[in-house]
Image (cartoon, grey):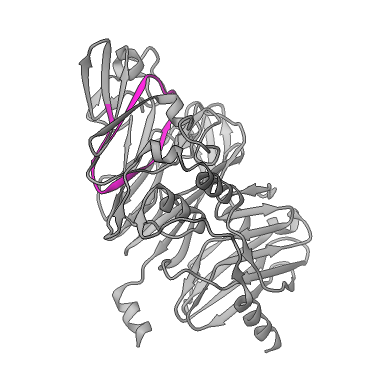
Amino acid sequence: MRRLLLILLLIGFGCSREQEVPVSFSEVSWSTLLSNVWKLEPQLFTASELFSSSSGPVSLTGYSPVKYGDLDHGTFLDIRTVAGGYEAVLAEADGPGAITWIWSANPVGELLVEVDGETSVYSFQSFLLGKWLPAKTAFASKTAGGFNLHFPIVHRKHCRLTLRVKSREELGALFYQVAWNRIETKKEIKPFDPGRIAESRTLLQQISRHWKAGRSDELGPISSRTIKPTETANLLWTMGRGGFQCLELSAGSKKELSGLHIEMYWDGEKEPSLSCPLYLLCGVSEHFEDIQSVPITVRGSVATIRWPMPFHQGAKVNIRNTGRKEVAVGVAASMKISRNVSGTFCGRVSSHWKLPLSGPNVLALATVPTAGRFVGCNIQVANHGSGWWGEGDPLIHLNGSDKPGWRGTGTEDYFGFAWCSDSRFQHPLRAQVRPGVLSRYHLLDTLPFSAGARFGFEAHGTGDGFMDYSALVLWYEEMSPMKSDMISK
């Protein structure tokens, strides 16, 4: 009983102490959407669509000087001849909404950004590198060969991205992905205005620092529990309505952390909503590399988990020691949750052994029967073959559709890099901490669904041999009406 009271005290003690960014949340703009990311609050998005060079109706792939991989290049919504060359439509959508992620492995030509009838023209490569932004490092970068822009191009009525180039060969070889999200709100929508963004250097710098440093939470005192090999110990347990805002787990070394398996139960569940190795939840390997992302930090032998975890009737967090020696595990927590965050924090681990490298493997990684939103995917691949393992595309079906709302151009492209690179990199929303150990968080380009969803990947490559493939998909799942009625009673 004493230990239970101590745990309840420490989780009730925590409170957020981060400095607020001066953003007006009475409107929807680039600043409010970027601020929601580091706060890990859901966006006002109701739908998501991915436009990519693998799924457009008009193709110039045959003009490419080189035929890459499984031909995920050179297709567009439309192509027309203009003076001096060609124009190809990469993405087009009616509003209100926002383009939330743009990626390319080989950006060329000029990009025409049309928002509500106003058009701005940029070098495509310069646009992705954020040279038009007064502060860019968190939002625009080139990582391991991939050019990425994580910045919301907000529009009220209409948005279109058009690429202008000199030759059909340039279009035929182009790889690109553009994520778009629909906005539903009664708030005022502030469309993309590069002039006003340029005037907001200080605000953008503040948000950038928060993205790169993660949310700062004041935690309660650390409680410690020694766990024997194969033993499962309850570290946190509480009754009633609430939510964990931050969990911090520590051990004597990275090796001790690597042997821990975490289980999270919400609202009296008999089976955990999430059960996985701690290192997989952190997006690192068994070596427990240091990492800094928006939802996760690993520093030495301390892992900080910032995913909001709301509950209605109670919560329980267990740790199992899968190592060979006993481990003293420390835990600290805060229990302040935003009213804007709803749904149960869930995850599913899927492991597949000895997949033939050249085989057309289609992996069903997670299926959600109700409403919710996917927020992350961490995968770990051991390649036992002679070629590249990641030719497969993401296949994300939203709202019960048989057609994937997201079908990209390759595994490494989904994680924001390119060209089969083994280079290590870290970004606030994605990382490769070692070859084949990848993380990707959908906090800006969110994946909401109202009628069930499936998250899958093609897993195949080139050459002979096989691969071992493990994945953790994370999502928030809204309660079914039946369960909601039972809780309210």
Please name the residue shown 68% across and 50% down the image: 288
Q: Is 112 included in the stretch rendered in magenta?
A: yes
Residue 162 in the image: state x and y as whole percent. 29, 27
Q: Which residues are magenta?
A: 89-114
Q: Nearer the viewer, residue 301 or 179?
A: 179
Q: Nearer the viewer, residue 87 or 25?
A: 25
Q: Is residue 46 visible?
A: no
Q: Nearer the viewer, residue 258 or 48?
A: 48
User: Would you place residue 251 above or below residue 3 in this image?
Assistant: above
Left or right: 241 with respect to 424? left
Residue lying furthest front: 199
Say which quarter of the image contains residue 458. top left
Residue 55 in the image: state x and y as whole percent. 29, 33
- Would you say the magenta stretch is mainly helix, strand or loop? strand
Q: Is residue 26 visible?
A: yes
Q: Is 116 included in the stretch rendered in magenta?
A: no
**If the image is split into quadrants, where does the N terminus sit?**
bottom right
Residue 432 in the image: state x and y as whole percent. 58, 40
User: Would you place residue 405 above or below residue 392 in this image?
Assistant: below
Say which quarter of the image contains residue 188. bottom left
Left or right: 229 with respect to 68? right
**If the image is split into quadrants, where does the C terminus sit?**
bottom left
Residue lying furthest top: 84
Please name the residue shown 68% across and 47% down the image: 289
